[in-house]
Amino acid sequence: MTEAIIQIKDLTISFKTYAGNLKAIRGIDLSLYPGETLAIVGESGSGKSVTTRSLMGLLAKNATIEAGEIIYHDQNLLKLSKKEMENIRGSQIAMIFQDPMTALNPTLTIGRQITEILIRKRGFSHSDARKEAINLLDLCGIIQAETRIDHYPHQFSGGQRQRIVIAIALAGDPEVLIADEPTTALDVTIQAQIIELLEKIQKEKNMTIIFITHDLGVVANVADRIAVMYAGKIVEIGSVDDIYYHPQHPYTWGLLTAMPTISKQDHLYAIPGSPPDLLNPPKGDAFAYRSEFALAIDFEEEPPMFEVSPGHYAATWLLHPMAPKITPPASIQERYRHYQEKQTHDKLARKEVSYE
């Protein structure tokens, strides 16, 4: 199997607040592989952004990394000095932030903001940096880049500003690109364009992408694997097909059921209740208090990660051999049927190929 670019091991992060220590990340294990797009999905406050900001060394001052390692090319990022992280940030691991207007400096032209990175991180001359900045803007879909390179952020639309932020992230020629909800502030049409752009860039540059979102529908066609987060933990991880068509955790069931569909619906489903207070995380499975499928053990003991199939894991006691058989929601059962049909179709297709 291909060796992971990044390995997160037992990462535990808390934030010191006036009310006490907020346990934002509670023992995460996660691997990222070359050339893949890994989507991290979950409600606001589940720990998605905190996890990826720890990769960049961009945690808030009140954050404490209580345990864990982040191994990148045989070095633990959590042990590096501020200067060493500055050398990695932007040139090896880069980030696209959610709000492009706050990510851009309103007093500098977009050309200046891109060329600064090219000069500082990659050693370009001023003239070569300007040429490369135009190429990056053109790659990211900015029309008339030769002229618009001298414009200021306020002279661009929201979608164009997000493209500029992507160009800035690409300026350091990173190996890993983190996209932190890059389409949240955009309308549906522009969202699709930005996702298509990220797919194009990944193929052209063979880049590895971490895509953070609260919307499972956004990553359906862009991700290779999906990690579902809840209350500071990964509760399910697998391929796109695993998560969309063969989900196992009740929280994943809830996220999928809550997705709008074009079919007739009397009402849009919403997961009942609210995420737990991470100042005092609940005992057992944190989702148990919101789940109609919770077992008695869920309120007493935290479930381990059970292997569903190679690469597909879920932290739910429903997968224990002694657990009672539970009937998932109707929409999830329908997804299971599609999954089984797809598996049968793929097997038949492989047999036909082998006979040729």
Image (spheres, helix red, strand yellow):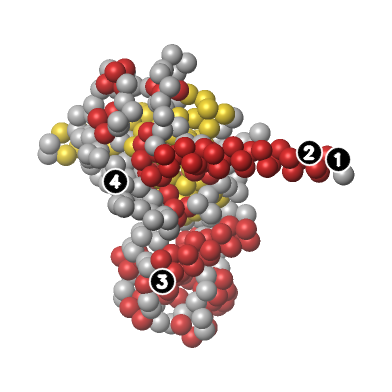
Q: Do the residues labelled 1 and 4 touch (CB within 8 Å)?
A: no
| Residue displayed at 25% across by 40% down | 272
What separation in Å lies between label 3 and label 4 (alpha carbons)?
29 Å
The residue that mark 2 highlights is 351
What separation in Å lies between label 2 and label 4 (alpha carbons)?
42 Å
Q: Are marks 3 and 1 in contact (CB under 8 Å)?
A: no
* Helix, strand or loop for disc 4: loop
The residue that mark 4 highlights is 270
What separation in Å lies between label 3 and label 2 (alpha carbons)?
46 Å
The residue that mark 1 highlights is 355
> Where is 347 relative to 194, above or below?
above
> Where is 124 relative to 85, above or below?
below
Outermost residue, left side: 18
Q: Which three-letter amino acid code belongs to the residue tagged 4?
A: Ala
What separation in Å lies between label 1 and label 2 (alpha carbons)?
6 Å
Query: Which badge, 3 or 2, is on the more N-terminal residue?
Result: 3
Give the x, y percent position of residue 243: 49, 40
